[in-house]
Image (spheres, rainbow, N blue to C red):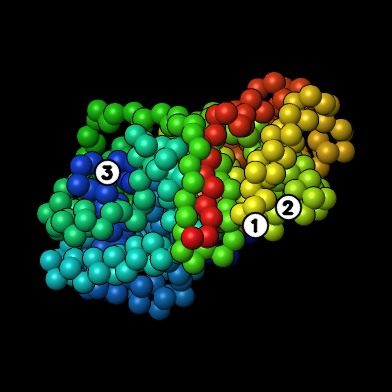
């Protein structure tokens, strides 16, 4: 997929694959993220570190990330060098070397990354909440993996994981930026792509659907050494990424509740009652089912009062009309946040890649159109019940 943005002075190469942690099988916990590391340890034609050196020498930069649903590799490069960068990227991602010595060395890096996460009490609390709320769903497992499984994994297991998931129907390459169809660098990109390893990938039909996320309600408490302030964490399941209307309604609702000083939860708990240091309500959009994550930082003795006030704020929102200024402010926050994400070629590529990868493509303006279709009453009737306190998995994390 390509998108010409004439005003962009660069070309953005985005390689996406449906190979996130949600697809890990028995004994593979952490393997998707580990593979992302190993990809940069060389391919059939690239030595370890050579990819980064050559991309930087061309004046570009690169990055990669592994999520629950997918993994993606990103290169931003001057137009005249885009074809060479494409060759390097596809060789690196589709033909990783996975040598035993490099595998053992990089495993130590991954284990250190895991240790650093486990050494942060805030991260421990969040993972405990996900594990409690999603006990039978892959979203409840840590993307970084479990130490015991990482220690047992082998290059052969990783190679099988790569063969199973990096297949034609699961991979997507997006080109965006300065891509005039008549330009020499655009023609070179098309020629290189036609002869690339990506063009030779075979499809393996029969992929099972992602398991649907349903958060398990409940109340939990956790004492953590070195935790400086108590945390109240709440997790709710919300519509999946494919339900654009539901996602935009959830985005609008969470913004009305906890985006900025004038939002209802922030104004009540922090500005008026001074019960919390901070309170956030974030929307995480995922293919198997999105979730809302609330985090309030406070003194341990204030947690019961905070819980009562959260319930009161939700009840008040359901019982009363949403004033027009508040409604318009919420819509502006959501719309502007989306627009700001499209200010660069990389932002546009990311939005288009994600929707096309998961076979629910939409025009760039589609989220804004769905946002306009919401009204205060439908938000209260349809979206607000999803954040009912009895639907939440709640965790109180307190200093030990």
Left or right placement of residue 141 versus residue 387 in this view: left
Front residue (pair 239, 280):
280
Q: Using the image, tell me which numbered label, if any, was put on residue 275.
A: 2
Residue at image mark 3: 24
Distance between the alpha carbons at the discs numbered 3 and 2: 41 Å
Q: Residue at image x 82%, y 31%?
A: 322
Q: Residue at image x 69%, y 34%?
A: 311
Residue at image mark 1: 299
Q: Earlier in the sequence, mark 3 or mark 1?
A: 3
Distance between the alpha carbons at the discs numbered 1 and 2: 8 Å
How many tags in the picture? 3
Q: Nearer the viewer, mark 3 or mark 2?
A: 2
Asked which secondary structure carries label 2, the reply is loop
Q: Using the image, tell me which numbered label, if any, was put on residue 190.
A: none
Asked which secondary structure carries label 1, the reply is loop
Please tell me whether residue 100 is drawn above or below residue 140 in the rendered image.
below
Left or right placement of residue 101 versus residue 197 in this view: left
- Mark 2, other Cα within 10 Å: few <14 / some 14–19 / many ≥20: many
Which quarter of the rendering shows the N terminus?
top left
Distance between the alpha carbons at the discs numbered 3 and 1: 38 Å
> Do we see residue 246 in this rendering?
no
Please tell me whether residue 105 is drawn above or below residue 126 in the rendered image.
below
Picture coordinates of residue 204 (x, y %)? Answer: 22, 34
- The answer to which quarter of the image holds residue 321 is top right
- The answer to which quarter of the image holds residue 139 is top left
């Amino acid at each position: 997929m390509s998108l010409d943005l004439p005003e962009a002075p660069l070309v953005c190469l985005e390689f996406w694959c449906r190979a996130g942690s949600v697809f890990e099988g028995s004994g593979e916990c952490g393997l998707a993220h580990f593979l992302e590391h190993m990809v940069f340890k060389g391919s059939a034609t690239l030595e370890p570190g050579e990819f980064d050196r050559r991309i930087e020498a061309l004046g570009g930069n690169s990055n990669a990330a592994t999520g629950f649903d997918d993994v993606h590799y990103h290169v931003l490069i001057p137009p005249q060098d885009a074809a060479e960068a494409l060759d390097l990227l596809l060789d690196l991602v589709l033909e990783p070397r996975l040598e035993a010595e490099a595998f053992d060395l990089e495993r130590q890096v991954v284990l250190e990354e895991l240790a650093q996460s486990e050494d942060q009490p805030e991260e421990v609390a969040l993972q405990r909440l996900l594990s409690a709320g999603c006990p039978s769903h892959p979203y409840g497992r840590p993307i970084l993996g479990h130490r015991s499984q990482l220690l047992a994994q082998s290059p052969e297991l990783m190679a099988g994981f790569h063969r199973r998931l990096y297949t034609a129907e699961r991979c997507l390459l997006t080109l965006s930026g300065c891509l005039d169809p008549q330009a020499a660098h655009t023609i070179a990109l098309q020629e290189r792509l036609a002869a690339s390893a990506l063009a030779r990938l075979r499809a393996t039909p029969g992929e099972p659907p992602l398991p649907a996320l349903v958060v398990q309600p409940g109340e939990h408490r956790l004492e953590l050494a070195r935790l400086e302030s108590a945390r109240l964490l709440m997790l709710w399941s919300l519509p999946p990424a494919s339900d654009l209307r539901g996602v935009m309604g959830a985005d609008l609702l969470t913004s009305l509740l906890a985006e900025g000083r004038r939002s209802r939860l922030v104004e009540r708990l922090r500005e008026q009652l001074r019960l919390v240091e901070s309170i956030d309500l974030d929307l995480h959009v995922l293919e198997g089912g999105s979730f809302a994550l609330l985090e309030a930082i406070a003194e341990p003795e204030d947690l019961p009062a905070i819980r009562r006030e959260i319930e009161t704020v939700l009840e008040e929102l359901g019982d009363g009309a949403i004033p027009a200024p508040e409604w318009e402010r919420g819509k502006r926050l959501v719309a502007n946040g989306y627009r700001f994400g499209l200010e660069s070629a990389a932002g546009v590529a990311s939005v288009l890649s994600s929707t096309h990868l998961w076979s629910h493509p939409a025009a760039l303006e589609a989220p804004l159109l769905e946002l306009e279709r919401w009204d205060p009453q439908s938000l209260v009737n349809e979206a607000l019940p999803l954040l009912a306190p009895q639907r939440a998995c709640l965790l109180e994390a307190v200093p030990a």
